[in-house]
Every structure is written in C-alpha cells, then in structure tokens.
Image (spheres, rainbow, N blue to C red):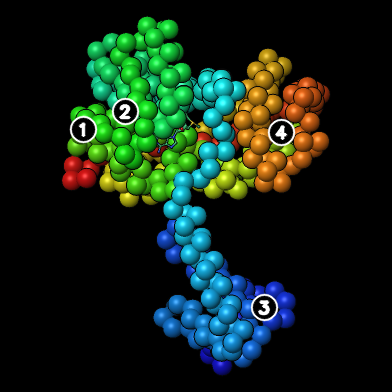
Amino acid sequence: MATTRCLSRRLARYERPGHLVFTYPSSGEADAQQRVRADGRKRASLACGTLLATLVGRRSTRALDGQRTRKASDESRRQRDPSYVLGRSENEERSLQERAKFFNPSTRRLFEDAGITTGMKVLDIGCGPGDVSFLAAELVGPTGRVVGVDMNPAIVATARARAQAAGTTQVSFIAGDIRHVGLEDSFDAVMGRFVLMYSAYPAASLRAALRAVRADGIAAFYEANMGAGVVSHPVSSMHQQLGRWLSETFARGGVEMAMGTKLYPVFLAAGLESPRLTTDAVIGGGREWLERYVSVFGASHLRSYLPQTLEYGIATEDEIGIETFDERYLEELLRQESVIQNFQCVGAWARKRRAA
Ligand SMILES: C[S@@+](CC[C@H](N)C(=O)[O-])C[C@H]1O[C@@H](n2cnc3c(N)ncnc32)[C@H](O)[C@@H]1O
C-alpha cells in the first residue's frame, strides 16, 4: 500500500494501458526518464527517496534490456560533441564576422570588467575568424599578446589573413582542438565566446584550456541561453518563427541550450572561483537598425544551418522561402514597428583557484 501511495505521488502518469512512464528525480547533468512496458504483474518499491521498480514477466525483462541499450546509446551520444550545426562554409565565416559586430560591445564590457588590460597575454578558445581575439588585442595593446585557437584550420587561415591585413602583430592563431593542443602555461587569461556550448563536456574543455593559464589568472566567457527563445513586441511571427527554427535545429544537433546559465557550475567544476555573471541580449528597433539586423541574422545566418534544419525535418524549403525571406521579414517588422530581441546571453568571469 505504501508503495502504491508513493507511486501515485512519484510516478508521472499512465500513458496508456500497459505503459508506465517513470519520471526519476534529476541527477547530475541529466534527468533520467525511463519508459517501461509492463504488461505483466507490476511491483515497485521506494527506498530512501530512490525509486526502484521491480518488474516481473518476460515482456518486462525484454523492455528493461531495451531500456539498457537505449541508455548505453544515450551515453555514447553524450560522449560526442554536438554537431557543429552552423557548418564550415565561406558564408558562415562571413556571417560570423557580421554577427560579431552585434556581440562585440557586450563582450568588450565583459573583458573590461574581468580585468583584461594592457600588457596581458591572453588565450581565445574557439576563436573562429578572430573577432574576439582582435577585441582582446585592443585591450592588451601592443605590449600584450593574444593567441587564438580553433579546431577548424580553414577559419584559422581566415583569422591569420585578417590579422596580417590589419597589421595586428600581437595576435597569432593556432589550428587545433583546445583539449589537445599543446600550449605554454603562462597565459594571464583565457576567454571564449559561443564555444563551450559546442562541447559535450564544457567543464572538461574549460579545465583543459585553464592548464595554459597561470594561478590566479582570469577566465572570461560569453555564451547564449538559446532555450530561452527570442522576443518581439509587437509580436513578429517571422521573428519568433526564425528563433524557433534556429533553437530547434541547435537542440536537435545536441548544442547546450542553457550554456549561459550553466557557466556558473561549469566554472566551479573547472577549478575557477565563483564567477560574476552578467546578462544581456542584442535588442533594437527602427528602420536603420532593423535593416542591419535582418541582413545579418536573417537569410545570411539561416543559410549556415539550413541543411540541418531541413535534414532534421524542422521546416521545409517552401516554408522557409530563403530567397524572399529577408524581404518578408523586414516588411513585417517595419509595418508593425516591432522591437526585437535575440537570444539571451550570459557573460561570466572569475579567477583560477591557486590549487587548480
Ligand atoms: C560560433 S563560433 C564562435 C567564434 C568566435 N568565438 C566568435 O564569437 O566570433 C565557434 C567556434 O568554436 C570552434 N570550436 C568549437 N569547439 C572547439 C574546440 N574544442 N577546440 C577549438 N575550437 C573549437 C569552432 O570551430 C568555431 O569556429
């Protein structure tokens, strides 16, 4: 009887006759949800707050085996990094540089708050075409040094070419995965923007990068909370739809949807002190700003993740109508005089614990 009472409190629901849906309490990073087919006799017991279901019968045993296999394949999925849903095209390289112009003011404020200053030697992980590295170079000045690392050699070549074209001599770039690349261990700071969200184990990636940072050095990261969605007022159906296509595609690709908020526990797990957090989002209105926003975050950005959106069945080419997308998007925003907001972002900075 006690078991029945506990079950009625703890079990989520009967989905349909013969199916129990067990919702377990959250544990670690993942909520474990187990679906158990139980056509035979069912007996469950609850001990010390842990739900233990014992199922009797051949079909139940088979179901549990299937469950174990699913669990194993979930594990192996988690061990892989998320798909890089933005792809590695030239269009994406250009789009990243355009998007950077919107995110740079907040990133600069974060770095200034974190104490990135003249003469420092800093490491930018997941540097892409170099925008964060160039921003850091302005803060550390000609007496400082910036090293950008990215696992995509093509984008590193672009970053190098940009540094050369701009005559920025205190910046250099290395092609490699931040978890394995060999670096000196004398950096004053490590930084990154929109990079930990692409790691299966962000704390492990950050810890690997911190090996190159001196004790008491700084970590400063800027990541998105894509799960929080986008905002518009008056509501723009196209802005909201675009936000859903983007976040659903990223979620299906395995990208961390709450990386901004998770920076706090990830910093602690990586051996940093409790981070200071800030939050903001790209937001604006008015013809000039909206034209600029649509030209960067509309079809140009969409083209980067479109193959995945289509592959995952999130939208069809007809629904998206890429060729006329920007025109229709801008027309709606201007007609409604909407103010629109992109995904919420979080900036975090902290010092490396001396013992880490
Ligand atoms: C969305 S881009 C951001 C680029 C840049 N930080 C910016 O804000 O403009 C993410 C970049 O991180 C890189 N990246 C992801 N995981 C990485 C890893 N483990 N090591 C090195 N680079 C990584 C990707 O190749 C990609 O260029």
Disc on the earlier residue, 2 or 3: 3
Return the x and y of residue 256 as percentages of the image width and height.
51, 46
Q: Which residue is mark 2?
A: 123
- Would you place residue 131 above or below residue 345 in this image? above
Residue nearer the viewer, 8 or 134: 134
Disc on the earlier residue, 2 or 4: 2
Q: Looking at numbered disc 2 in the image, what kind of residue is underneath it?
A: Leu
Q: Residue at x 57, y 26 (%)?
A: 89
Residue 220 horizontal side relative to residue 65, left or right: left
Q: Looking at numbered disc 3 in the image, what kind of residue is underneath it?
A: His
- Residue 133 occupies which quadrant of the picture? top left
- Mark 2 residue element: strand
Residue nearer the viewer, 297 or 275: 297
Specify the label residue 239 is tagged with.
4
- Mark 1 residue element: loop
Q: Looking at numbered disc 4 in the image, what kind of residue is underneath it?
A: His
Q: Are marks 2 and 4 in contact (CB under 8 Å)?
A: no
Q: Which residue is mark 1?
A: 185
- Mark 4 residue element: helix
Q: Residue at x 53, y 38 (%)?
A: 84
